[in-house]
């Protein structure tokens, strides 16, 4: 087995201790982690709790048959998959079709030849390892879809989805909530004078400052161009101002060298807050913060401004 590949978890189900032992002895311990169940009912409970990747089950059992267990496992596995092998003394075509229709992936007649069982399990293992890879790649694609490629921060879609949920919880439980819009001042002149690579360096530097100066409970994102969004909960107006000013001052003190020339870039901030007991929607809070941001730009840039009427009572 590849040393980096974790063992496959296998649930072995049979009301016969001898049959369970024979299956267990057939499977290499370095490739499989074994769970044991003495009945279909016990197996289902164990499956729900542990979610093994493979099930090897007897057909004829007193409380829940292997066929019924197959159907129950498939009903439970809405967003995942488990490979199921049915073992039985029944060998007719009708039984094979019934097993496959119930959700079994493979079928082996008892008494089985251990090398044949091992070969069938190995085939299932290959499928489940491919399934692992697909799941991992799917998760990576989901993360990439929610991440800004240049800065590594969440993107607009990610913060919108997260913030709507957070705001709903803040309103329900009476927490404070704040939205901070940030924009790099005169950023176009950086690109025009020093080139887009220089602009990218500025964006990444500012993203790093944001990420290093927010709490784990906050989220910051790049939402387009030189615009960034920071969402905070459980913080009062003074706390929001302190956070925004800290980030502003950090950026103000940064020095960049482009082509032998020193440059510095500042940022402006617009803030909209929601006090405990008040209600609002996220889109409106963003709009209020955006208006405050442009007010900061009009009043000289490199400053933090709060929205006027940034909350409303409903």
Image (cartoon, helix red, strand yellow):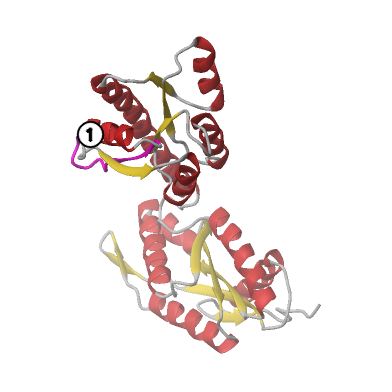
Q: Eyeballing the image, is 42 above or below 129?
A: below
Image check: 124 left or right of 238?
Answer: left
Give the answer, above or below, for where 202 lies relative to 289. above
x%, y% of residue 180?
A: 57, 73
Residue at the image position 50 percent from the left and 43 percent from the top: 41
In the image, residue 157 sits, relative to residue 123, either above or below, namely below
Most foreground residue, 29 or 303: 29
> Which residue is at the front of the view, 91 or 137?
91
Residue at 42% over, 30% down: 58
| On-image quarter of the N terminus | top left
Mark 1: secondary structure = helix
Instruction: Tell which residue pokes out farthest to the right in this image.
Output: 314
Specify whether residue 290 is in view: no
Q: Residue at x 50, y 79 (%)?
A: 244
* Magenta region: 1-14
Q: Position of residue 4 (x, y in %)?
A: 22, 42
Instruction: Say how many tags the image has.
Output: 1
Q: Residue at x 40, y 37 (%)?
A: 15
Residue 166 in view of the camera:
yes
């Amino acid at each position: 087995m590849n040393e980096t590949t974790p063992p496959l978890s296998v649930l072995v189900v049979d009301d016969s201790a001898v049959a369970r032992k024979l299956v267990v002895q057939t499977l290499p311990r370095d490739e499989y982690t074994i769970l044991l169940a003495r009945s279909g009912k016990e197996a289902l409970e164990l499956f729900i709790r542990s979610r093994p990747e493979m099930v090897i089950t007897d057909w004829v059992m007193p409380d829940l048959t292997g066929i019924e267990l197959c159907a129950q496992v498939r009903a439970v596995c809405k967003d995942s998959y488990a490979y199921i092998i049915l073992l039985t003394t029944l060998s007719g075509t009708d039984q094979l079709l019934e097993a496959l229709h119930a959700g079994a992936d493979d079928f082996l007649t008892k008494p089985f030849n251990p090398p044949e069982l091992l070969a069938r399990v190995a085939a299932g293992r290959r499928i489940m390892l491919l399934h692992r890879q697909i799941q991992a790649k799917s998760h990576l694609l989901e993360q990439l879809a929610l991440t800004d490629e240049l800065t590594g921060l969440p993107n607009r879609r990610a913060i919108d989805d997260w913030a709507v949920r957070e705001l709903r919880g803040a309103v329900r439980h009476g927490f404070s909530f704040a939205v901070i819009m940030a924009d790099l001042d005169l950023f176009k002149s950086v690109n025009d004078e020093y080139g887009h690579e220089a602009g990218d360096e500025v964006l990444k530097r500012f993203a790093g400052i944001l990420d290093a100066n927010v709490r784990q409970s906050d989220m910051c994102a790049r939402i387009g161009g030189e615009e960034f969004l920071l969402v905070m909960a459980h913080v009062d107006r003074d706390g929001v101002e302190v956070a925004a000013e800290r980030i502003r001052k950090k950026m103000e003190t940064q020095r960049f060298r482009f082509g032998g020339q020193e440059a510095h870039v500042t940022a402006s901030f617009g803030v909209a807050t929601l006090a405990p007991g008040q209600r609002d929607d996220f889109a409106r809070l963003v709009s209020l913060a955006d208006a405050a941001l442009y007010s900061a730009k009009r009043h000289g840039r490199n400053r933090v401004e709060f929205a006027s009427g940034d909350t409303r009572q409903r």
